[in-house]
Image (cartoon, grey):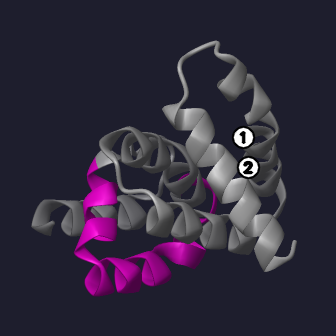
Amino acid sequence: MTNAELESVAEGWIRYQLAAEGSTEQAEDWNSVSTVFDIRAGDPNLLWQLILAIHSRNQSDEVRCVLSAGPLEDLLVDHGTTFIEVVEQQANDDPGFASLLRGVYRRSMTGDVWRRVMEIANRS
């Protein structure tokens, strides 16, 4: 996926989250949401880049809530042992990103990953 394609998916995902439920606008951006599901299933590095792209473009409460409990949580559940250090570094560099960890649920994260997520969340 090119940078332009990544940006387009991020922007479409954001528009979908902000659109009225069942609206034409939401339907028009469903493809971006579907693409995020596909990325989650196949490419954790690309998912991480997408999370950062979304976060950098929109920090509204609506978007942050879904980003936390959606793509970010999915990344940590599926690939937390691989990505926790990168997440910690991003949280150290960006307090706004750190606060996203407050919206993540444990689900099936390992105990170590969850402990580290909670450390970030509790200090943000």
What residue is rendered at 36% in x and 56% in y? 59
Q: Amino acid at mark 1?
A: Val
Q: Residue at x 54, y 35 (%)?
A: 17
Q: Secondary structure at mark 1?
A: helix
Where residue 69 appears, as percent x and y from the top left, is 45, 42
The picture quadrant where one finds residue 51 is bottom right
The residue labelled by disc 1 is 33
Bin the neighbour count of mark 1 within 10 Å (Cα to Cα): few under 14, some 14-19, many 20 and up. some
Number of numbered discs: 2
Please give the range of residues in magenta.
77-102
Majority SS type along the magenta span? helix
- Residue 40, x across and y down, in percent: 73, 54
According to the image, label 2 marks what residue?
A: 36
- Towards the viewer: 8 or 80: 8
Q: Residue at x 76, y 45 (%)?
A: 32
* Amino acid identity at mark 2: Val
Could you tell me residue 60's position as x and y percent?
34, 48
Give left or right: position of 1 versus 33.
right
Alpha carbon of mark 2 to alpha carbon of mark 1: how far? Answer: 5 Å
Element at label 2 = helix
Q: Which residue is farthest front?
A: 24
Tag 2 and tag 1, C-beta contact below 8 Å: yes
